[in-house]
Amino acid sequence: MLIILAAIILFHITSAILLFIATIRNEWWISNNFSLDLWYHCNVSDCYDIPNSATSDAAYLQTVQATMILATILCCVGFFVFILQLFRLKQGERFVFTAIIQLLSAFCVMTGASIYTAEHLMFNGEGFKNGEYGYAFVVAWVAFPITFLSGLMYLVLRKRK
């Protein structure tokens, strides 16, 4: 039982770390001369706000920002709820509330990464068409199945002695 508990905790912490990296790092879209993330456009020497990121034309970018932040917050809240449930649940009960929070986090990651995949050229502008996805974008997609599997593990897990 302790091995399963340790594995679930490790899985949850891994998904939280991946979500933090994906949300914070400046490598969602890269080229030879620049890199873009959800917040800034950086060249070799300095970083700038993404052009028109505060307008209604960039609603897709704002949605991706919101869903990635929400996914990270939900993942962290889910961990604290799990710790509380670990000491408060009666024997034989399932960690349903933690599972719901973790599955919501996975849904937010999937939504944000999907919107970025579909619309990144629209809010990045014409000057950013020549490039490729960066590692933070890949980390966001890797965080989705890990967070989803973590949520499923909480659904299956029962509290034992």
Image: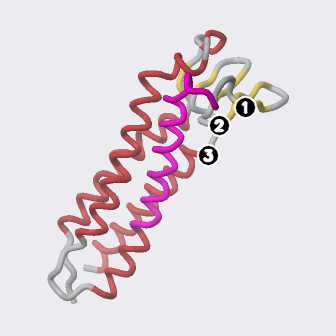
Give the residue at x 62% y 24%.
30
Residue 7 drawn at (x, y percent): 34, 67
For residue 38, side relative to residue 105 (left or right): right
Q: Which residue is mark 3?
A: 24
Give the residue at x 65% y 19%.
31
* Label 2 to label 3: alpha-carbon separation: 8 Å
Residue 76 drawn at (x, y percent): 47, 64
Q: Quadrant of the C terminus?
A: bottom left
Q: Main secondary structure of the magenta part?
A: helix
For residue 120, side relative to residue 100 (left or right): right
Give the residue at x 27% y 69%.
97
Amino acid type, label 2: Trp
Give the residue at x 61% y 27%.
55
Q: Which residue is mark 2?
A: 39
**In the rendered image, the vertical position of residue 111 relative to residue 126, given as above or below:** below
Does 71 lie within the magenta span?
yes
